[in-house]
Amino acid sequence: MSWHRLVIKDAFRQLLGRVLSALAGFLVIKIMSPYLGPLRYGDYSTILKYFAIWSALADFWLYVIAVRTLGRLRESNPAKLASEYGKFIGARFINIVVVYTFALVLAYLLPAYTSNPYLIRWLPIGMAFSATFMAAGIVQLPLQLFWKMEQLSIGLVLARISQIGALAAIIYRLYPQMVFDWSPVSKIAFLAIMGTVLLSALTQFAYVFWQAHKILPINIQFSRPFIRNEIQSNRQYGLAYCFSSFHTLAVLILLSNYYPTVQWFTYTGIRALALALIEIFLIVPAALGNSLLHKIASYTAEQKRKSFGNFLQLIWWIGCIIAVNLFIRSGDIIRIVWGEDFLWTSRSNPGANQILPFLWVVLALSFIKQVYNYLFVAQEKQNVLLWINVIWVIIGLAVGLWAIPHYGIIGGIITQLTLEVAFVLGSVWIAYRHNTLPYISRIKTWLVTIIALLIAYGWYIYIYPYSHNIGQMILYAGIGNLTIMAVSYKYIRNLARWLTTQ
């Protein structure tokens, strides 16, 4: 099988698993969000997103560095592969312990959290979930290296199934029709809901550990020189990665601080619901990037620029298609999946459908940013982004500290859009300065994008008004998407073929 097909096949397996997991995730939120309501769903999201911020620091871009390093070893020195793999696991585990312990202690010093019994009591559950998820993330390396990512997909699906089963037992048998006031039983019910998240992470970890160990025996090594060298060598890029991941989650934290759920503000839960859709699709560039990176690690700089040019054009096309679909049907998606409680009704009562269209712009920009992140790692220039990302985060936080208190959710959108545009422009500028810009066909890219947008516009004007139920919505969405794919098929096929060009 040709390399480009192997890369696409491996990425497709990841995407398929993520799609199945996402569908199960929709079901999870469909079951959970009406049960918890916007207020308690906001608390649930705050706990998880708080530790998600710290997960970027716990990772420190170690996974991508490991993919590149172990990919080279597989080609040049397979005998060292198991030993180095064990060292990467050990480094990640040390990071997890140090970072999450600090994060938990800090959380107990934040008044917005300590004043809310739903947050302060169950923060350790969120920490345990995030730590377990991060541990599974590094253990899966053999699946990535040996093109067995379908096993990760199976693990994700099993994790969701276990969570859905536990949720069904809690919501329909143990604590049905719960009113989440400040009573002990409502707090126990909330704890049980949080426990389902931890159960899903443990299920995923156990399955991934089992499958990875069959491919490459897991022998964890806590090597101080190795950990010290990795931190020193990649500290600038690790911090840059943390900063580039920080802003999306920071907006949610600022909202929860200025508009706490204990004062009956629903902003956090509303925005978290819309953001959950965005996060599902962020796996697309990561799946392709991880599959591509260890194959092209030994390419010349020029060959990498060609490969990443095709990668960038492919990711941009995928991002535009997703954005168009979910922009057109944002209100219907929120209504069908999560119910009327999360819809916009008045200026004082914003809804997820109100901010979802803006977040699809964020999604497309984030796709571009991720491609450049992988490009810098492939070109051994992973440390060049630190200071420009620091500057953007400082500016973005200044915007957020002004906009969010004044404009609430809209202020959060302003903050996030400002930062995403800044990160993309900064990445392009840095790539230009270091002569690493990917080679792209601008004319073809613009032509395909314009044609797709024109088809989407016609779809929105002439077809959208006639779809009044979920069956019609799926039918007309299928017609619109198939038309776009038919028009761009040859272009996309060529991009995929030349992902691994030499």
Image: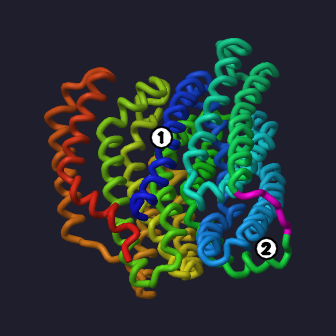
Q: Residues within 10 Å of mark 1 (few under 14, many from 20)?
A: many
Q: Residue 421 — which label? A: none
Between the C-alphas of marks 2 and 1, the distance is 35 Å
As drawn, the residue found furthest toward the front would be 1
Q: Position of residue 60 (x, y in %)?
A: 67, 67
The residue shown at (71%, 50%) is 214
**Start and end of the magenta stretch?**
216-222
The residue shown at (61%, 22%) is 35
Which element carries disc 2, helix, strand or loop? helix
Query: Nearest the camera: 414 or 283?
Result: 283
Q: Amino acid at mark 1?
A: Val
* Quadrant of image for the N terminus: bottom left
Q: Position of residue 262 (x, y in %)?
A: 68, 34
Q: Amino acid at mark 2?
A: Ile
Q: Is residue 219 magenta?
A: yes
Query: Nearest the camera: 2 or 257?
Result: 2
Q: Which residue is mark 1?
A: 19
Q: Is residue 268 above or below residue 364?
A: above
Q: Is any part of residue 372 visible from this angle? A: yes
* Quadrant of image for the C terminus: bottom left
Query: In the picture, residue 79 is in which quadrant?
Result: bottom right
Q: Is residue 149 above or below residue 436?
A: above
Which element carries disc 1, helix, strand or loop? helix
Q: Which residue is mark 2?
A: 227
Q: Is any part of residue 54 visible from this angle? A: no
Query: Nearest the camera: 79 or 480?
Result: 79
**Badge 2 or badge 1: first in the primary sequence:** 1
Q: Image check: 156 left or right of 123?
A: left
The residue shown at (41%, 26%) is 335
Q: Position of residue 145 (x, y in %)?
A: 60, 61
